[in-house]
Image (cartoon, helix red, strand yellow):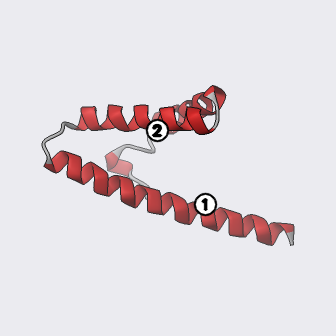
Amino acid sequence: MEQGLNDIDRLLREEKRLSAVESYEDAWAEGRAAGIEADIMAEAAIATALGELIRSSDESGALALLERMRDRLIAGEFDSEIRIH
């Protein structure tokens, strides 16, 4: 039973993640269409996300997220040539 609940939780989290990605991609496209440069959009998105995470969690949660994202960046996960999505 515990495994079944873990599977459901994992699936729900993935659905939420995909919905968040879709929402973010829409917002990104709107910003780019308005002439906002990619680096400005990215910095604003990261700063907003970290601020929200600190408000809802704490600084250690934000730092842990940054570490995970750093590891993923180094691993090439965000390289457009080898995009896994």
Q: Residue at x 30, y 52 (%)?
A: 27
Circle 2 sits in a helix, a strand or a loop, which is it?
helix
**Mark 1 sits on what residue?**
13
Quadrant of image for the N terminus: bottom right
Whole-percent x, y for residue 71 in the image:
54, 34
Q: Secondary structure at mark 1?
A: helix
Left or right, 5 with respect to 44, comes to right
Disc number for residue 49: 2
Q: Is residue 2 above or below residue 85?
A: below
Query: Which of these two is toward me, 57 or 69?
Result: 57
Compared across the picture, whether 26 is left or right of 70 comes to: left
Q: Quadrant of residue 48?
A: top left
Q: Position of residue 68 (x, y in %)?
A: 57, 36
Q: Kindly report which numbered mark, 1 or 2, lies closer to the viewer in this rendering.
A: 2
Q: Is residue 77 left or right of residue 33?
A: right
**Could you tell me which residue is drawn at 57 percent across and 34 percent down?**
55
Real-space Cα distance between discs 1 and 2?
17 Å
* Of 54 and 64, the residue lying toward us: 54
Q: Residue at x 54, y 66 (%)?
A: 15
Q: Residues within 10 Å of mark 1 (few under 14, many from 20)?
A: few
Q: Nearer the viewer, residue 81 or 71?
A: 71
